Image (cartoon, helix red, strand yellow):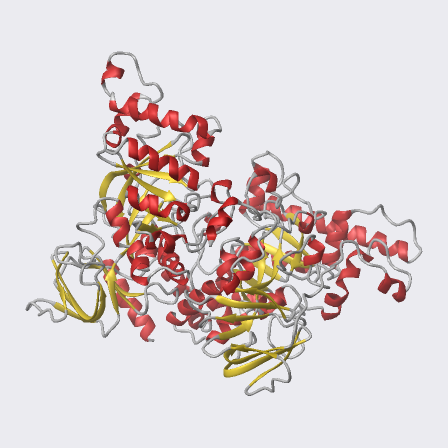
Amino acid sequence: MRSRLHPVVALLAGFALTACATAPETEEEAADERAPFASTYTPRPSTPTLIRGATVLDGNGAEFENADVLMREGRIVAVGPNLSTDGATVVDGVGRFVTPGIIDAHSHLGVYPAPSIPATSDGNELTQPNTAEVWAEHSVWPQDPGFQRAVAGGVTTLHVLPGSGNLFGGRGVTLRPVLGARTVQEMKFPDAPHSLKMACGENPSRVYGTRNSSPATGMGNVAGYRQAFANAQRYARRVQDAEDGNGEPPDRDLEMETLGGVLNGDIILQWHCYRADEMATAIEISREFDFEIAAFHHAVEAYKITDLLVEEGICAAIWADWWGFKLEGYDGIRENIPFVHAGGGCAVVHSDSEVGIQRLNQEAAKALADGRRAGLQITRAEAWTWLSRNPARALQIDDETGTLEPGRRADVVVWSADPLSSYAVAERVYIDGALIYERSQVNDRPSDFELGQSYRESMQ
Amino acid sequence: MRFFSALLLAAAALAAPVAAETVLIRDGRVVTNGAAGTIESGDVLIVDGRISAVGANVSAPRDARIVEANGRFVTPGAFAAMSEIGLSEISGSGAPNDADLDNDDITAAADAGRAFNPSVTAIAVTRMEGVTRAAIAPSSTGAIFGGRGALVTMSGEPDSLFRQSAFMVVELGETGATRIGGSRAALWPAFEAALRDAREYPNRYRSGQGGAILSELDAAALQPFARGQGLFLVHIESAADIRRLIRFKRDNPSLRFAIHGGAEAWQVASELARADIPVIVDPLSNLPDRFERLAARLDNAALLERAGVNVAIAPAPGTVDAHQARLVLQLAGNAVANGMDWDAAFAAVSRAPAEIFGVGSSVGRLERNYQADVVIWDGDPLQVTSAPDAVFIEGVEQPLVSRQTQLRDRYHPSRQAQR
């Protein structure tokens, strides 16, 4: 089994991304130098908080009855019975459920914001099949009203990706849906690595084939991936040679910097791929060029190759039940997520939707129930790993969030009832220990776009 | 093991569909959708494809098969108030898609009933989740008229189309404006001209005058609707557009309208109730993703229902598809999560669509003489975790298998382990 995670890389990623272009001379200089577009996110003010007497799903597969959750200085301090209040604000958790915040590994919020008009269609740079040089964050509109709706659905972290029309769509970014952010940098999850979005299948060959250019076929797709990585290897060698004193460095090439980041592990690969055979081909390419795939996205046929995914340590980010809208989505089954889970794989429930992101808990609930009806024994606490721990792994932020382990960021949701149901709603959402959403204060921090719209006066 | 033997039984059922039989479902939590409300411990008797009796202690005829519900939910089948099911096997990928009619040669005359294919795999996928009927229509045409919709059952049988030309889709909002030069300013005059063309069909066409806006074919198809003999299903979202429709109805009281969309309908809820215009809403529509939906909110369905509007639930225009009609129950559950009464939410995906589309006297309730579309559930039907244990359509028990369950069984982890 090949190792998938690079914990050190994850911490340094902010610097490492640019390091291949402008290598800092000393470590000290590196520490002072702020990477371009680095996160300027700061946690909102928080007070120590104790949620008392709740049913806790810890995001790591365990459930605790009548347990307390203590948060202090933005971090989880403890989960257990009868914790000492110790001056913390006490929140009544009796009859309620507490979970880690939901992490959506596949969102287009901000890049395809509401309102949806041509001017806001900012997610797909469909000008050539390889646009590894573009960054989704440079399309993100922080005032997208979708961010507030996502928080109300219990989402505390989301990964915003470019669309899937290109072989190489560009870099994805991990964000905090904090309300009131004025810039995307104020939303960026500190030190989370960039991803590269790649796409298999029908989309790129349709987009470019209809323009009578490559790729027009599945084989054209694969040739496109391989040639690009071959070029990136050559570029990386020239950079390395120059650093070793042999010759001039190549001109800066943003596309090559992204692909080079994938080759050296600084940038994690999120690969849109529906069909089992195409995922297997993608794995073969990753072997040829010696890089790793963090997750296949959509992965409608993941259940057919669970063994391969487990062997490679690749997560599968999946819808609960979408199918049939394209031929490559024809074999979708409701048991895809539980089958990947049962095979020992890293199953992730993702949305790819500004509507779905608001109720990913229900999608996990469907997958759980369908898995059980197929005879699998899965607990609701295990099902919650699909929503927090596993996506955190796929995004390489699992040292920071995704579970309620002590020391993790206090990204916490208090649910009105068992969240693996239709009726439960998020009552309170904490990010880094700060209460950023309360259901009783519905939409009290609308985006600038929504402010002053006449209907708001009649909402009371 | 029990799982697989159940499958074998189901597969056998698929091979030889049973005819309508006499069935007594005993001791269920029976949601009648009628005057009897929910009967906590009730029986439902099915004879010859119809409901024969519903009540606390229905006696079993000698030939009746007894099904013990043991307190489980027993409900009318769900009715998807809008779907493209049966109009394509695969909707994208350049595959044939009869829901996608994008020219304007044939508009009002387009007829979804003539395109419906009961053999698509989505039918079995849908009915095994408790949806037994659907209203279908093309997703779009190139004009303000989307064509005639049809009503179908999920039996998959050749006769499953049970009402052709059941409604006429008309676009009178943002989408409609794009079809008529880009502006609502042209939309209503065009609609009124089309109604005149239809009312004056066939005379003005035979006289050689021709239609002001409609072809002869479209005028003929529109005529019954323009004379108040059929329902206009109007795609509108904004409060301003809805007010225009209410005024138009006041001036044209013989015409029949229902709204599909209505994201901002909560703002004009009492006016809609007074005008007796039902609304098919999407309880997940809460984003200002279109300028006609800036005021969309999650409790739209609850607010409308409370104001006395007849509310049905379906995906919003633009998100209706051919494969996920089964999700209408999840939509209704979300309406409950956002304040709608459970009974009203369930009725919104069963009785209300039947009433809106004119079949409410035979479909959508568990009452005597109603079509025996009956579902026995393993839990609360509006919970995403629940699924049917048994589905009857017109008294015939349906196999709970589909192409998806066959894929599931082929790749089941317990079989993979033996590989």
Residue located farthest toward the right when viewing the structure as drawn: A245
The residue located at (26%, 46%) in the rendering is: B356
Q: Give the vertical position of B100 relative to A283 (above or below).
A: above
Residue B239 drawn at (x, y percent) = 42, 41
The residue located at (75%, 67%) in the rendering is: A11
In this rendering, does residue B285 appear at all?
yes
Residue A367 drawn at (x, y percent) = 44, 66
Residue B389 drawn at (x, y percent) = 28, 67
Residue located farthest toward the top when viewing the structure as drawn: B208
B239 relative position to A30: left or right? left
Q: Nearer the viewer, residue A111 or B100?
A: A111
The residue located at (44%, 41%) in the rendering is: B238
**Which image quarter holds the N terminus of chain B?**
bottom left
Q: Quadrant of residue B248?
A: top left
* Picture mark count: 0
Q: Nearer the viewer, residue A401 or B3?
A: A401
Residue located farthest toward the left when viewing the structure as drawn: B62
The residue located at (39%, 73%) in the rendering is: A375
Q: Quadrant of residue A58?
A: bottom right
In this rendering, does residue A298 appear at all?
no
B45 relative position to A416: left or right? left
A397 relative position to A249: left or right? left
Q: Nearer the viewer, residue B208 or A394?
A: B208
Residue B26 drawn at (x, y percent) = 17, 71
